[in-house]
Amino acid sequence: MSLSSEYSCDVLVIGSGAAGLSLALRLAEKHQVIVLSKGPVSEGSTFYAQGGIAAVFDETDSIESHVEDTLIAGDGLCDREAVSFIASNARHCVQWLIDNGVLFDKENSQDTYHLTREGGHSHRRILHSADATGRAVETTLVSQALSHPSIHIIERSNAVDLIASDKPGFPGERRVVGAYIWNRKREKVETCRARVVVLATGGAAKVYQYTTNPDVASGDGIAMAWRAGCRVANLEFNQFHPTCLFHPEARNFLLTEALRGEGALLKRPDGTRFMPDFDPRAELAPRDIVARAIDHEMKRLGADCMYLDISHKPADFILAHFPTIAEKLSTLGFDLTKEPIPIVPAAHYTCGGVMVDHHGRTDLSGLYAIGEVSYTGLHGANRLASNSLLECLVYGWSAAEDIAEYLKQVPTVEDLPAWDESRVDDSDERVIIQHNWHELRLFMWDYVGIVRTTRRLERALRRINLLQQEIEEYYVHFRISNNLLELRNLVLVAELMVRCAMERKESRGLHYTLDYPQQLPEARPTILTP
């Protein structure tokens, strides 16, 4: 088998959202960086994030208050040290965004930022750019990365697997030395030699039938890290956003939590409110409580959806704060200023992931994981609103600092083993992939959704094991494709999610099981080891 390397760099960043691009820009002043994007460079969860970024900018607020709100939302399972680390470094990391050109909304005086409030927060501390904060962040970072001479962006390419130095001829400790890349334009697997690899691939919500996430959120980084020998944690905690638009033409359109922060009410089809019946914080309760309440009312009434209503607010106020949402709804025949909007919960955020330390280091030397792909201890059993983009920025900074030091010590690998596809054929049965994809997402929704039971989890695991056998046989015998790679990763992450859920013999945060409705006295993370 011949040896070759099509690409070579100091740092390979797999993923082009807020985490990956902020890290790339910080390192590119002194190092050569390749950013791998599965779709167009701006396509990802960051671009579609509506709400904002949580950080203490108000004099009446405090870092301690931000920490406490996060711990409460995390239902006893957050790592306090990690929460304090992120909250303490929030302001300077957000200021870095501002210095790089991101424009957040200001009050009329133009001297202070307009801060909104979302569920679980005790203060107004959400910096935002109208209702399209993610777009403002992503477009700014993409623009800077595209024009940077030391950053090379490869679009429409998938990372297949990591390459570790556990082959003959690699000296020293086991470490990551690169990755295999599926170039969809050339329909060829290429190699990328790198002294450091950073996973910034986002979450895995596409494992569910209904999700707010873009198609690229297929758990790739979690699956690759697991196959490379890294631990994962807390994958039973999948956050279902309470308010996704219920409409056949816009199944993944999110209605931001900031709507409820600014006074929107949740209502039954008959127009009555129900959240005060479930929690004294009503519409501003954390997402796990709101999602379960909506799910409960839908099942109790046999209703297809519930409704979100902000029409009691002045139209000018609504259109000024939520122009993107109002425009999108208008194209679908809804008027946000005059009527309730039909909503359902949908899978939104993966709170667990690849285990890392405060610098984003995984169990494999030279491999880092930042953003939604990682488990830092910040989110615990439920993520507090607008802490996700913050986590991306803080770990983009802290990992970049650590990588800069690591690169001073680690040598460059000369050659990597080329991809071998000498024993595979072109498939004439690609419909199998589509059938398996739909089956997986449907039974994950039914069996590993908002409310679970041991029997449902056992059924899911049996189905997953059968799918894995089929997919592995297909993977071995046929040339790869984008759908095959995503399905292979999703079914593995689904297994890890179910295994984590089966180990947790309690209900806590986002994991609610009818068989163990009470909490255990001591909260512990669920850790899986390959």
Image (cartoon, rainbow, N blue to C red):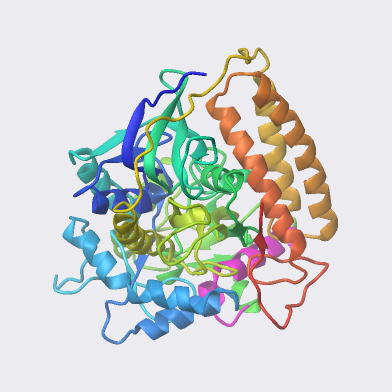
Q: Classify 272 as above or below 409.
A: below
Tally of numbered tags: 0
Q: Is residue 294 magenta?
A: yes
What x and y, as percent, mark residue 437? 66, 34
Q: Does the magenta stretch include residue 36?
A: no
Picture quadrant of residue 129? bottom left
At a point 79% along the width and 54% down the height, the residue shown is 457
Image position of 255 (left or right of 503):
left
Image position of 312 (left or right of 280):
left
Image position of 106 (left or right of 243):
left
Q: Classify 322 as above or below 430.
A: below
Picture quadrant of residue 6? top left
At a point 76% along the width and 33% down the height, the residue shown is 469
Q: Is residue 272 something one can see in this rendering?
A: no
What x and y, as percent, mark residue 190? 43, 25
Q: Residue furthest bottom?
A: 60
What x and y, as percent, mark residue 433? 66, 26
Q: Classify 203 as above or below 296.
A: above
Toward the viewer: 485 or 51? 485
At a point 18% along the width and 56% down the height, the residue shown is 100
Toward the viewer: 407 or 457? 407
Q: Which residue lies furthest to the right in this view?
A: 455
What x and y, as percent, mark residue 8? 33, 33
Magenta region, residue range = 279-300
Image position of 230 (left or right of 468):
left
Toward the viewer: 29 or 253? 29
Q: Is the magenta stretch mostly helix, strand or loop?
A: helix
Q: Is residue 488 something one can see in this rendering?
A: yes
